[in-house]
Image (cartoon, grey):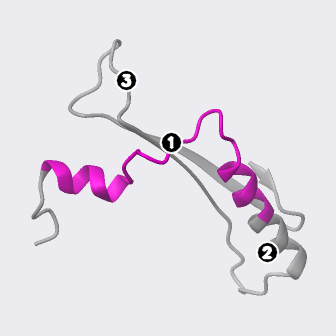
């Protein structure tokens, strides 16, 4: 969870594998995301700023983020099946 002040954001880590993963498999991609929701959609500036700061902090974790030569999740899908969305 990420403390956004008035709300807590739920975090998710998604690991993408080429095929069914086994004990020795390494993911081909990892995706970290978070979400938060206000049923009234009245987000305060504090909540929005904390969410933006959390996203910047995740992007700045250079020890585990992909290098400039890596593919996006969409590029990974299309390299295996270029008509995926047709």
Q: Position of residue 59 (x, y in %)?
A: 66, 52
Query: Residue sitting at 87 percent across and 68 percent down?
Result: 6
Residue on which the image places disc 1: 67
Residue on which the image places disc 3: 26
In the image, is residue 46 part of the stretch drawn in magenta? no
Q: Position of residue 71 (x, y in %)?
A: 36, 49
Task: Give SS at disc 1.
Answer: loop
Residue on which the image places disc 2: 48
* Range of magenta residues: 53-80
Q: Earlier in the sequence, mark 3 or mark 1?
A: 3
Quarter-of-image position of residue 19 = top left
Q: Residue 51, relative to residue 69: is it above or below?
A: below
26 vs 53, left or right, is left
Q: Earlier in the sequence, mark 2 or mark 3?
A: 3
65 vs 51, left or right, is left
Number of residues whose C-alpha sits closer than 10 Å to that of mark 1, classed few (under 14), some (14–19) or many (20 or more):
few
Q: Nearer the viewer, mark 2 or mark 3?
A: 3
Q: Position of residue 36 (x, y in %)?
A: 68, 66
């Amino acid at each position: 969870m990420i403390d956004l002040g008035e709300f807590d954001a739920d975090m998710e880590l998604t690991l993408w594998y080429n095929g069914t993963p086994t004990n020795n498999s390494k993911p081909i991609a990892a995706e970290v995301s978070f979400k938060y929701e206000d049923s009234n959609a009245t987000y305060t500036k504090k909540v929005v700023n904390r969410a933006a700061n959390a996203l910047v902090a995740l992007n700045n974790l250079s020890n585990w983020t992909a290098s400039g030569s890596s593919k996006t999740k969409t590029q990974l899908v299309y390299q295996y099946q270029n008509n995926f969305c047709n």
